[in-house]
Image: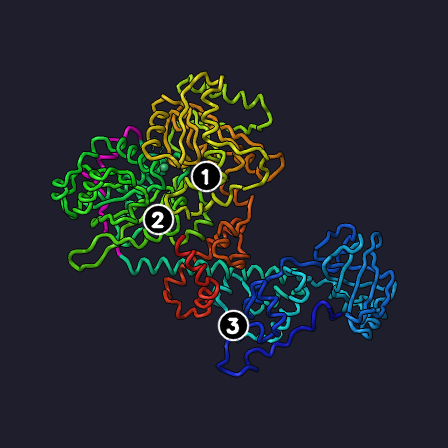
Amino acid sequence: MSPSPPHGPAAGAPGAASRPPGSVPFLLRPLDKVLGRRTADQLAKQGAATVAGLLRLLPRRYDTWGELTDLATLAEGEQATLQAEVVRSAARRTRSGRPPAILEATVTDGSGLMDVVLFGAAGLMSAYAAQLVPGSTVLLSGRVGIRQGRRQLAGPRFQVLTDLDDAEREALLARPVPIYPATDALPSWRVAKAVRTVLDQLGPEDVPDPIPADLRDSEGLIDALTAYRWVHMPEGPSQWKAARARLRHEEALVTQTALAQRRAKHAATRTAVAWPEPEADGSLRAALDDSLPFCLTEGQRRVGDELAAALASATPMQRLLQGDVGSGKTLVALRAMAQVVGGGGQAALLAPTEVLAAQHRDSLAALLGPLAGAGTLESSLLTAPGQVPVPTTALHLLTGSTPAPERRRILAALAGGEPGIIVGTHALLSETVRMPFLGLVVVDEQHRFGVAQRDALRERPGITDPATGQVRTPHLLVMTATPIPRTIAMTVFGDLATSILDELPAGRSPVETFLVPWDRQTWVEGLWRRAASEIAGGGRVYVVCPRIDAGDDAMTVEEAPEPLAAGVGLLDGLAGGAGDGSPARALAAVEDWAERLASEPALGGAGVAALTGRMTSAEKDAAMRSFASGAAPVLVATTVIEVGVDIPEATMMVILDADRFGLSQLHQLRGRVGRGGRPSVCMAVTGAEVGSPAYHRLRAFASTLDGFALAEADLDLRSEGNVLGAAQSGRRSDLDLLRVRRDAALIERARAQAEAIIAADPLLSEHRALAAAIADRLDDEAQAYLERS
Ligand code: ADP
Ligand code: MG
């Protein structure tokens, strides 16, 4: 504890000039060499190990002395910065001698009282007591504790205002007080002091600026050293604001440059087969277009053109296709696959679960009709790459449960180079499935895929060029129905190009959504009567539960991709508010509810099927079929039906314990209805208390059908750090200034700036500081995260 003024004298900066040449750059010096072991150890716990790390430990907020704090409002544990008047003070020696003396004072803001205690040497304590005379005005900064029922500041920093002349006092009161994340062992003022010690030794030479000077000029940004001075020791609010704006820009630029560099590297080191854009007629894709029973939406046409052009290039396509539930992504993918197959290549469509893979095969077969006619080994021999395309395609389904003989047949056809489409789960990749003419990989519902699978995809070798022997990478199209706000797409998926399908096919009817509290008995009963009337009208009803059976305590993660459940849903897994607002009542389970509904009087004996990830694929198949056919118009299921399932007759979605699901999951579930022409409803049954976070999430869900709006609401409702994977990378400070919602425009600008930098200087040899910042900030783990995403 020291009574040093809240800010030291303005720093003269000796800087690099005073240090021996060739020593470790000052920014990289370990803190124990600069500040001493004890402080360094404590700062290390805050994540700051080097000078640079300490400089990036930014104040959480800035307080102002000038504003009188109302003592009555201070809560225990709060960092308080306050101006008060001394009521009494007295120093005394302690009996134990440790500490030797103690000063006890009481201060007031005019209404409330607070105790202040200071400890130290006897001489010092009496000197302080002489300063803190009753009636003097004092500035205090410290953490509020409670002692014997009274608020207390123990060991605060203080400054007696009455000692200062008017000018000094005015300057001091105007100065923002940086408040750092603090612990008991390391209060905010000690962090501030450590930062000042470091800043005092820092010269311009020491802080290479990752933002190129011309960019700083055009953006009106201050330089790096000034930014660190102003963010830690601002003379006024405008300084810390300018400093944070600059550091935020730096963060955006560093991240975006890392991603731009990756994109450029990928484009430069790998090539793909260029599949010529389909002829207006005669091609497989033209034949497909002609046979469709409906017109393409505007979006399908536009995205289709984007994909056709990308496939026609030898630069491997790396594209993320976002389209809300029901926007018709399957057809977009099929048209792209038709381009490749039409050119004599092979295309793979991967789904996260067997149920979905089977569904995809069925819907591709329906869309293709007679075009899915080819498929013999003989016919494939006639159409090697480059030869006249035959306007039919083979269509295979290969999953873990494909019977052995069929499996062998399919594998042989693929290995023999037969052009065609293969649909499967990601197991397709992990097995030794040889596809020598693999030209396009489509991944559906990518957010359910684990990181490892995506890595496998990137590395998947495709066609070997017979002339050069060079291996060509297949094009990659990743599809997601979880809308990803643009800034997240740019940040987390920054190395993928993005296409957006923002329009639903005509003739869709909106889904009305209702919240049904569990404790409204009559509403819950009414729900099953409504189900009965939907069924009577030819509809189907989904009933989704968070659990399989009473003993299953997990959220249904086992429904996630087999067998590696590691895939963290980008917008999902984290949002499924475990625990918030959840009732003590046992969560709804599929087995239990399937039984109950079978004997529910209101349903009048309608057939009930159950579907969970625990069933064999034959059982799942049977359940889906009896639901689709109407033999069992009620399907009680886990989130296994969350993505992709397409039964146009379904008109009602009941989600039991809806508060257990994340917003985007709910949106996916609701997307299972309203797919035919008939009006549909979604009932979210919940025990969440009014006003709880879970309740807010459900209200947001009920209020809009727009998946993008929901994704944004989702972001607003929870910490963005999670979204950006900071949790996975284990780093606290990554992207800590940048807020993807607030800084959307900045991120977009930084992306363009990064592209320009990389285009002119791919290796960043003229931008050493920027290269260093990338290496430093995106340490191995974070870099790996960005690479995988
Ligand atoms: P999602 O984008 O959710 O995967 P799907 O690809 O499953 O959507 O398409 C949903 C439904 O819309 C399917 O039944 C599909 O055949 C149909 N569909 C696709 N495109 C159109 C269109 N242009 N006009 C009418 N219906 C379409
Ligand atoms: Mg789909």
Residue 732 position within the rendered picture, expressed as x and y whole percent measured from the top left: 54, 58
Sequence-wise, the earlier of marks 3 and 1 is: 3
- Foreground mark, 3 or 2, reads 3
Q: Cα distance, mark 3 to mark 2?
A: 38 Å
Amino acid type shown at disc 1 = Thr
Q: Please, what secondary structure does the residue beneath circle 3 have? A: helix
For the record, the magenta segment spans: 271-294
Dominant SS in magenta: loop
- Marks 2/1 in contact by CB < 8 Å: the verdict is no
Residue 723 position within the rendered picture, expressed as x and y whole percent measured from the top left: 49, 49
Residue 229 lies left or right of residue 209; in this view the side is right
Q: Which mark is residue 556?
A: 1
Dot 1 crowding, Cα within 10 Å, few <14, some 14–19, many 20+: some
Residue displayed at 74% across by 65% down = 157
Q: Say if 633 sits above or below 553 in the image.
A: above
| Quadrant of the rendered image holding ligand 2 | top left
Residue 452 position within the rendered picture, expressed as x and y whole percent measured from the top left: 37, 52
